[in-house]
Amino acid sequence: MERTGVGAVTKTQWTCFILYMAIAGGYLGLEIDSFVGDLPFFRLDTVLLLINIMVIPLIPLIFRVLAVSFTQRQNRGVTYAAAVSGALYLLLIAFLAIYKSVCRIDFDFYFFLYNTDDALPVIIKMFAPWIPVILLTGAAFMYILKNAFVLPTRQALKSPKKARRIILTALFFCCVCQIVTLQDVRGSTAGFVYASSLSDRKLRDDYAGLYAKHIEALQESLPRRTDRFDPSALGDAVFIVKQESLNGLLANPEITPQLFRAGRDGVLIQKMYGNSIQSLRGYGCILCGVPPSITFALADAYPAAELEKLNCLPRIFQDLGYRTLYFFGGSRNPRIVHFAESIGFEKVLADDIMRPEDVKYNWGYREDIFYARVREYLKARYDGQKLFVFIDTGATNHAPFDVLDKSLNKKVPFPRPRNFTERISNTTFAQDAYFGILYDMFVEDYGDRGTLIAVSDHAWPIPVHKDNIFNERGAYEENFLISFLFVPPMSKAAEFDIGARVPIRFSQMDIQPAILDLLGMERPELLGESFAPWLLKTSDNRNPGETKATLSIQPYGGGFIALVKYPKKYLFSVLDKNVRIYDLEKDPGEFSPEIHPVDEYIPLIHDFFRRQHKYPDGLGSELWTEQ
């Protein structure tokens, strides 16, 4: 032990103290810039934010000075430990501040927690080049803190009671101000704590409980054959092709010409709801007809034996004599393999069908090459057999949304993209070009005897609302709208409303009910609604006024539950603990919501899980019509 009340402060220690203050000032500037944005700087809430965050970057120093003021001694080992822990703390708050500055949203711990298996490899891949910089920055922070501690701790030793009184008063004042203004004025660190720990657990827990009970009910139910049962209604080859991150607002003849070309041979739903915001979550909705989870994805939450009981589409087609194959356009993903094999795919094919020279990007093999390998594999091993095939690719229309295929650079809609919307329009166009190649292959090989379905796993938002360009934030229409294409066998084209455009916004959860309906089967336990009447040429069951509500989940950014009974949209905010009600006809941009307490509208969520006022008690049904 040594008492450090003697000795002059060295030039190095003064320099490090000044550097530390500069780092703290830079942090405060970044936080204020993120908060203010395009708004006027001189406002009351800017002052409140400054009060709230002014102690955040000084926490290592504050705790060190407090410790010295109580013990009135310094210990070299404790100083080093404080410098190390302080450096780690500074790295953390720097990450949170930079994340908020870039994404314009607080970092949500659940985003990492629910995706640990995929998040860790992605983070390592993305930040591997920066690891030396991060380590050097951490070492620099440690060195700066060790020396910066000297001046204030020596001052504290001269008057420990006064030091404690000043520090504790400042801490108390800042903490009280932050608590009072937490709902509306908070920096990235307080926002991280608020989003991860202080959001409305009741709303999450209510939904999670209803979801778990519904999964149990599905596990106990089986699809039933009706007197219309026809196992050949879709032909003997059924292909579902995933369109990565295809936003329904970008589906048009200029950006997705191949989708619209294929739509002339079938039925196109230009705007359909994706039920969630990630691929694996979307697959549960598409293939199993289940609602999305607000916590862990279906594949992560249930073991294989439990998933097998859900009777998803591959299991249903397997029972009808189809070979069920899942083609994944990248390296084998353990979560995908677990999910696909558990729900009835007999094989998951990935790298094993590719060649060493095939072009592979960060998110998988280039789609046109992968499609060619899928075709080769099927012709060599499954020619003439009944097939149910799911093709999962996503190399092109993926963050950071750059067209990597030079042959398409002069064909894209925006050869020199100036903003995010133009960049994602280009990658959507490139993905669509590859889809056109697949579609021609399908028509040639299976067109007369097979059905092709093309559907997006989820939307990627375009900035209809400012800064809404990240998948883990927001729950507006641009976050959920996707497109859906259905092309029946040419031999059965006369039975379908070929060339039609469906105006109703159905959802991914409706795909399994629609397919079962076309096969002459039913499963009332599903929460989705069959849109088969809108696919068939002659149908008396089209009644837009009686369509069910759709449900979409944004599990991140604090958490949102969106229920749409068009034109009304009820957006439950887990973080803000309120419900925003939009009229999508009068306010399609979602700029003028009515805001109500959550408890008043929770019955709508219960009602959805009771198959939407089909039960005698009609829980919540009066709320659908009162607005």
Image (cartoon, rainbow, N blue to C red):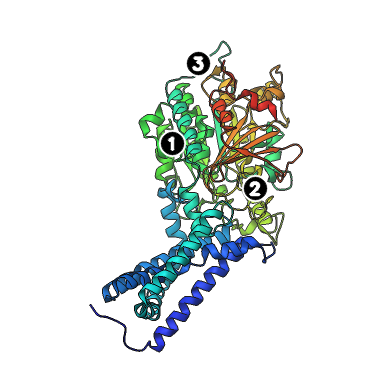
Amino acid type, residue under disc 1 in the picture? Ala
Residue at image coords 64%, 53% = 424
Task: Residue type at mark 2: give it.
Answer: Ala
Residue occupied by mark 2: 433
Mark 2 or 3, nearer chain start: 3
Q: Is residue 19 visible?
A: yes
Horizontal arrangement in the rendering, residue 27 relative to residue 88 (left or right): right
Q: Which residue is mark 3?
A: 224
As displayed, is residue 491 above or below residue 241? above
Q: Mark 1 highlights which residue?
A: 340
Which circle's residue, 3 or 1, is located before the other in the chain?
Answer: 3
Provide the secondary structure element on which disc 2 rests. helix
Image quadrant holding the N terminus, namely: bottom left
- Residue at mark 3 to residue at mark 1: CA–CA distance: 23 Å
Which of 265 and 484 lies nearest the eye of the viewer? 484
The percent coordinates of residue 514 (x first, y second) are: 59, 25
Q: Amino acid at mark 3?
A: Arg
Q: Quadrant of residue 566?
A: top right
Task: Tell which of 197 and 91 is nearer to you.
Answer: 197
CA distance separating discs 2 and 3: 39 Å
Image coordinates of residue 618 in percent, x first then y, are: 59, 20
Name the residue located 39 percent from the left edge and 81 percent from the top edge: 151
Left or right: 176 in relation to 406 = left
Q: Is residue 259 above or below residue 420?
A: above
Which is more toward the observer, 322 or 32? Answer: 32
Residue at point 63%, 52% (across, down): 468
Figure quadrant of residue 127: bottom left
